[in-house]
Image (spheres, rainbow, N blue to C red):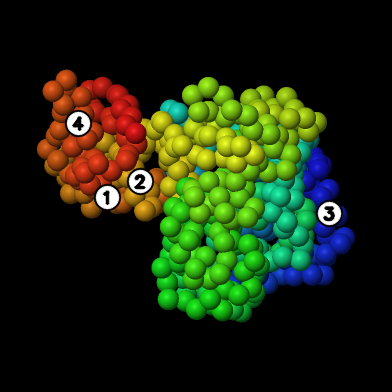
Amino acid sequence: MSHALLKAWERTLRRRGPERAVIEAAGAQSCTFRELDDRAVRWVAAHAPAGPASLSGRAVVFAAANGIGWFEIFIGLLRAGAVIVPLDASEPPAAQRRLAEALRAGFWWDGIRLIHLGAARRFRDARTCLIKLTSGSTGRPRPLVFSAVQILADARQVTATMGITANDLNYAMIPLGHSYGLGNLTVPLLTRGVPIVIGSAPLPHAVADDFVRWQPTVFPGVPAVWRALAASDLPAKKMASLRLAISAGAPLPSEVARDFNIRFGRPVHAFYGSSETGGISYDKSGAATLVSGVGRPLRGVRVTALRGGRIRVRSAAVFTKGNRHWGGSLGSWTPPDRAEIMAGGALFLLGRRGTTVKISGRRVNLVEVAGRLQRLPGVREAWVGVGFGPEPMLGAAVATDRPVADLRLELQIDTASWKIPKKWLALASLPLTARGKTDTRALQARLFGQGASVSTASISSNKSARQISA
């Protein structure tokens, strides 16, 4: 299988083959575009069970940490014609395999070898390129099947709007396989030759040391990173090479944007998107970010207002059920977020109602987490909520006689770290209102403080219910 993304990578090799493509800041290891491709070819030759052709048209699931090795796998699968399914590296192996089997993937990379899975689906359209997994309303991962044309369109819209070119050096702290990472880091490297330095650690002084040594110019991050840097004691000269600071994955508090600008003399540019649509809007000047806006639609993206504060997003990058727009015509999607479109097209997010929330750029379905807690031995009821303070925080109240530390350890076996509650409350039973429903206000106050804004989900042993509060 050969498609537009692979052809774009081959053009990049011809243009930039001997130039440096990826730097791992932690160990100062690097490789050129040509060396990266050679390593990818060797990876496929060493691990494809019956040669590269055996992967063609098959979904291949893998999880790996950011680095040269991640690109080896991704480009190797691209060259083999596989349908690539990148997972977060924090997903435990048991969860990875369960996801692969639910997807009817052909193969799963367990970190050592490619494991062939039975009852595999074959994708016969050569334009099928990549599958993103995202939480649906039921908590079950929902596969979003993309063509190479759609993946390319997202990266093109992002780089054109943000002015990112091959002369830049991207700083990678977000996961390369996340929707945000794909559009801002991975695909721009493959198709535009934008090199990447992999950050050594998500700590202010480590980030500063990386900037001093490698001089990256573009940094796509999440609010937690900007908050930590703004609150640090770092001198502005440490980040002197930074020309473009981008924030996405969750709303960026305006005070964090102001504090970062004051300390480092650089605005933070809000960026908004979703797994289904790729990038949607961007604050080019940084002014809208200071008043909690998310800018205007990217080039090639159309946003229209619907009733109830919803919006419809149209572009060549948008996932559409059945993917009937393979040729590059516009697809459309209505995100769960509510938004207001101001004069001139600027977007302001008004929040969302539902049980799926974003924490540090990752979607977390509260029903899924509550269900996982409920399945643990000795848990009679489970309530899960997110407190929206300076940073979103996942919390859980459980009706159990078991120690919370034991529950947390058992949950870690097959649950990604970012889906594990940070705050816990163990009770004999969950409090009820006068009408016999879980008293979410009481739990909210005990976990997150009186009057905090939360989204919640609760599940008991004798019935299932979802309770939402704004």
Q: Secondary structure at mark 1?
A: strand
Tell me the CA gap for discs 3 and 1.
48 Å
Mark closest to the chain's N terminus, 2 or 4: 2
Q: Which residue is mark 3?
A: 10
Asked whether disc 1 touches disc 4, contact meaning CB atoms under 8 Å apart, the reply is no
Q: Secondary structure at mark 4?
A: loop
Please indicate whether residue 91 sits to the left or right of residue 270 in the image. left
Q: In front here: 8 or 392? A: 392
Q: Position of residue 345 (x, y in %)?
A: 63, 38
The local crowd at label 1, few if under 14, some if 14 to 19, many if 20 or more residues have their Cα within 10 Å, is some
Please indicate whether residue 318 sits to the left or right of residue 53 in the image. left
Asked whether disc 2 touches disc 4, contact meaning CB atoms under 8 Å apart, the reply is no
Tell me the CA gap for discs 2 and 4.
19 Å
Amino acid type, mark 4: Asp
Amino acid type, mark 2: Phe
Tell me the CA gap for discs 1 and 2.
13 Å
The local crowd at label 2, few if under 14, some if 14 to 19, many if 20 or more residues have their Cα within 10 Å, is some
Q: Which residue is mark 1?
A: 423
Q: Quadrant of the C terminus?
A: top left
The local crowd at label 4, few if under 14, some if 14 to 19, many if 20 or more residues have their Cα within 10 Å, is some
The circle drawn on residue 388 is: 2
Q: Secondary structure at mark 2?
A: strand
Mark closest to the chain's N terminus, 3 or 1: 3
Res 208 seen here: yes
Q: Position of residue 317 (x, y in %)?
A: 70, 37
Q: Residue at x 82, y 50 (%)?
A: 8
Q: Which residue is mark 4?
A: 439
Amino acid type, mark 3: Glu
